[in-house]
Image (spheres, rainbow, N blue to C red):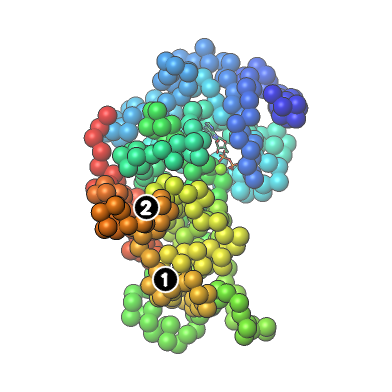
Amino acid sequence: IDLSVQHDMDKLQAAFPNFKDNYRLIKRIGEGTFSTVYKAEDIQYHRYENRWDIDAVENQWRPPPLRNSRSNSTSTSVRTRQKPKFVAIKKIYVTSSPARILNELELLHDLRDSHSVCPLITAFREADQVLAILPYFRHQDFRKYYPHMSVYDMRVYFRSLFTALAAVHEKGIIHRDIKPTNFLYDPDKKRGVLVDFGLAEREGVDTKPCLCHEDRQVRKQKLQQSVAFSSVQAGPQPGYPVNDTRPSRRANRAGTRGFRAPEVLFKCTEQTTKIDIWSAGVILLTILCKRFPFFNSADDVEALIEIATIFGSKKMKMAGQLHGCVFDTNIPTIGERGFTFEKIMLWSTCRSDVSKDGRPSTLTEEEKGAIEFLTRCMELDPTKRISAKQALAHDFLQIDAD
Ligand code: ADP
Ligand code: MG
């Protein structure tokens, strides 16, 4: 182990009284903007009556099987009392605000029985330091498995991800940071769990009415009165107003670059759980195109340019109007009509050339099925975008029980 990691681990053990009686730190498994995560062994494990379902190979916690778990309510209550042998200890940085830390722990507590969501076992605080204890979930690095995923593998992966999203959204919670590193997936077991509720929030709290939730006629009227306008300009701005007197808009923009939904970029003030569906769509686009990261913008305007390149300026203008935003661009690579996902996938996987028999190459039937599902997830209008529950009923996610 790296000396500085060992030093951090020693410090952590010293900061919490009795830490060493309860946990044995094994290694550091993650380091993010807001936390460091360690793998540890729960050394009191042998004492528990209700031990967690233990995997024969690596003594690790295993989430219950995907099917039929909801029908049996007693098994859920047992599950919360059970203990895993290996845990993930998430040390939340002291620079995070107390409100933010409390929010994460509260939401995790709310989601304790939710399927495919990594449950919180317990949490400790010592002065300004907070530790969240979660069952350790073995997973692989996304970069390692995504280039080799078949369409069937994608369906299994997204069935698992959307199961978690449906459970989170059912509670009225928006995760806000759906991306590969926050969905721990084990390709061998074909199971995943959702982690990291550090940016999550309750839907409908801290929102203001946005035009996107008005009926079309009302929106049209309001747009004509142009009271609700603010504008996003993409590209060089010769006539950019220096003394812009329009009120600036405030909206939650938390999330990760490249995974932000268009309504987040357009500063919609009434964001919903649909923003997570867009981000899940970006993961699917990444896997289909075999390019990670797929979007690589430095800021929100650049992110809008990237999305506009795919969808075209016409649809992008309409998407902006939904939230009272004017989208305007003079960038030559953004066409009016954009490109289909099918084209983008063929280009990205270098299959756009004409094949030997002289006809343009096309996608397989199952790839077309994936693109159809992708189109439903990456729908610019959040009110038309598929929900997690609807997604679970979509053809693409119907797979045989294993
Ligand atoms: P952050 O807010 O710093 O992003 P996360 O909760 O996303 O914190 O955890 C960071 C990383 O730690 C994850 O990407 C994952 O690799 C690892 N990790 C987190 N929770 C677990 C867990 N329960 N089991 C195994 N690894 C985990
Ligand atoms: Mg994370």
Note whether 327 is above or below 135 in the view shown. below
Task: Please report the residue visible at 41 percent of the width from the left and 75 percent of the height from the top.
Answer: 336
Q: Secondary structure at mark 2?
A: loop
Quadrant of image for the N terminus = top right
Q: Amino acid at mark 2?
A: Arg
Q: Secondary structure at mark 1?
A: loop
Task: Please report the residue visible at 25 percent of the width from the left and 42 percent of the height from the top.
Answer: 398
Q: CA distance from mark 1 to mark 2?
A: 22 Å
Note whether 68 is above or below 163 in the view shown. above
Tell which tag, 1 or 2, sits nearer the viewer.
Answer: 2
Numbered badge on residue 45: none
In the picture of the structure, the residue carrying the numbered disc 2 is: 351
Left or right, 105 with respect to 288, comes to right
Q: Position of residue 298 (x, y in %)?
A: 61, 60
**Local crowd at mark 1 within 10 Å, few (<14), some, or many (≥20)?**
many
Q: Position of residue 391 (x, y in %)?
A: 30, 50
Numbered badge on residue 312: 1
Q: Position of residue 320 (x, y in %)?
A: 45, 73
Ligand 1 rendered quadrant: top right
